[in-house]
Image (cartoon, rainbow, N blue to C red):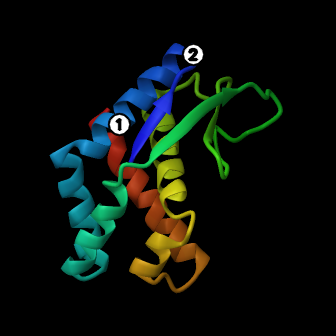
């Protein structure tokens, strides 16, 4: 999975570039393996990695909405970044973007089928923990 941003917002460009580096990083993959083995069996880890390693190109676009509190919106055709809300920390924005990446990867419930979440809360907790791993690599 690769993120593609062609806009002019420099901070968004840097965050997307860092997210792309993380998605191919062996250290990040090792941390994801540790997360998966803590909750699931080790053979699930390989299936999960194949979803993240697909050649799918995900478009990232910016929008400006001062009334929205959300930093990242994941829609069917792209991940939208609110350029006003990512002005604080690169780390927090990267965490939000990686959460959006996982949501895009789970569009057809591919991840949900592999990991067999019991409810939406467990799914959301796993997505947050996955995204939080990226905070250490900024």
Q: Give the mark, 1 or 2, whose residue is nearer the N terminus.
A: 2
Which type of secondary structure does the marked residue at label 1 adopt? helix
Vertical placement of residue 72 versus 107, above or below: above
- The residue at which mark 2 appears reads as 9
Vertical placement of residue 37 versus 29, above or below: below
Give the Cα distance between marks 1 and 2.
17 Å
User: Which quadrant of the rendered structure holds the C terminus?
Assistant: top left
Residue drawn at the location 27% of the way across and 77% of the way down: 44
- Using residue 13 as the reference point, say whether residue 130 is left or right of it: left
> Residue 123's x, y, as percent?
52, 72
Residue at the extreme right of the image, as rendered? 67
Q: Which mark is residue 36?
A: none
- The residue at which mark 1 appears reads as 20
- Using residue 95 as the reference point, say whether residue 107 is left or right of it: right
User: Is disc 1 in contact with disc 2, using a CB cutoff of under 8 Å?
Assistant: no
Whether residue 32 is visible, yes or no, is yes
Residue drawn at the location 62% of the way across and 31% of the way down: 61
- Using residue 85 as the reference point, say whether residue 51 is left or right of it: left
Residue drawn at the location 35% of the way across and 54% of the way down: 54
Residue drawn at the location 60% of the way across and 76% of the way down: 120
> Residue 52's x, y, as percent?
35, 56
**79, 54: nearer the viewer:** 54
Whether residue 85 is visible, yes or no, is no
> Residue 77's x, y, as percent?
64, 46
Vertical placement of residue 5 versus 72, above or below: above
| Category of crowding for the residue at label 2, using alpha-carbon neighbours closer than 10 angstroms: few (below 14), some (14–19), many (at least 20) | few
Which type of secondary structure does the marked residue at label 2 adopt? loop
């Amino acid at each position: 999975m690769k993120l593609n941003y062609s806009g002019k917002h420099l901070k968004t460009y840097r965050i997307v570039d860092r997210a792309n580096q993380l998605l191919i990083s062996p250290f990040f993959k090792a941390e994801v393996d540790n997360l998966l083995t803590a909750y699931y069996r080790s053979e699930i880890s390989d299936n999960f990695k194949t979803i993240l390693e697909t050649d799918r190109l995900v478009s990232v676009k910016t929008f400006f909405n001062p009334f929205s509190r959300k930093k990242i919106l994941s829609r069917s055709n792209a991940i939208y970044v609110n350029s006003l809300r990512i002005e604080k920390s690169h780390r927090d924005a990267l965490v939000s973007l990686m959460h959006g990446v996982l949501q895009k990867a789970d569009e057809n419930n591919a991840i949900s089928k592999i990991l067999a979440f019991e409810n939406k809360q467990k799914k959301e907790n796993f997505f947050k923990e996955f995204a939080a791993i990226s905070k250490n690599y900024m």
